[in-house]
Image (tube, rainbow, N blue to C red):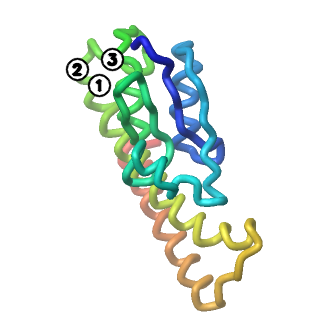
Amino acid sequence: MSEELVVYMNIISPYSRLVMSMLALLDIPHKERVIDTSRGEQKKEWYKKINPKMKIPAIKDGDHIMAESIDICKYLIESRKLKTPAWPVDDRDRNEQMEKDLADFEDLGEATMAVAYKCFYNKVFGKKLASAEETKQYKEDLYKVYDLSEETLSERRT
């Protein structure tokens, strides 16, 4: 692409870190634009034009805009025709297994982030803390995430 690659990210986000790790691994030049999620910057009108779902990360590569960390990583490899063990484009079976593994990672990540956000966001940012009943529900939700993690790992015998 002729224009500079811009990555809209926040280092707190594991999805942003995944994209940033891929960029470092592949040595792809880029510009970082930190999105301050603690101030709701991802909900600003200008960012909605980048990512209508208002999530991070997202990229702008010339005229091409996209979100979702796994899709971004695949796009970076495929659009630049890079050969890397990080994404085996020539090995269909391995590629399919990686797709499944990454989808599982994304599901677990979403569930973990949702619970972590509920549990810690207000405390970290000095907002009103959850009631005892809400805290109990968060704990139950967290156990469900742990169960899902254990199930996923046991299926893989990990």
Residue 62 occupies which quadrant of the picture?
top left
Secondary structure beneath disc 1? helix
The kind of residue on which mark 2 rests is Arg
Circle nearer the N terminus (1, 3): 3
Q: Secondary structure at mark 2?
A: helix
Mark-to-mark CA distance, 1 and 3: 13 Å
What residue is drawn where x is 37% and y is 51%? Answer: 52
Mark number displayed over residue 122: none
Residue 43: image location, x then y, percent: 50, 58
Q: Answer with mark 2 or mark 3, whichever residue precedes in sequence.
A: 3
156 vs 134, nearest the viewer: 134
Q: Nearer the viewer, residue 148 or 7?
A: 7
Residue at the image position 46 percent from the left and 39 percent from the top: 58
| Residue 12 vertical placement versus 124 (above, below) | above
Residue 41 seen by the camera: yes
Q: Report the disc number at residue 78.
A: 3
Per the image, the residue denoted by label 1 is 95
Residue 9 picture quarter = top right
Quarter of the picture containing the N terminus is top left
Q: How many marks?
A: 3
Residue under numbered circle 2: 92
Q: Secondary structure at mark 3?
A: helix
Per the model, the C-alpha gap separating discs 2 and 1 is 5 Å
Q: Residue at x 71, y 76 (%)?
A: 127
Q: Position of residue 99 (x, y in %)?
A: 31, 34
Please provide percent x and percent y for residue 104. Answer: 37, 47
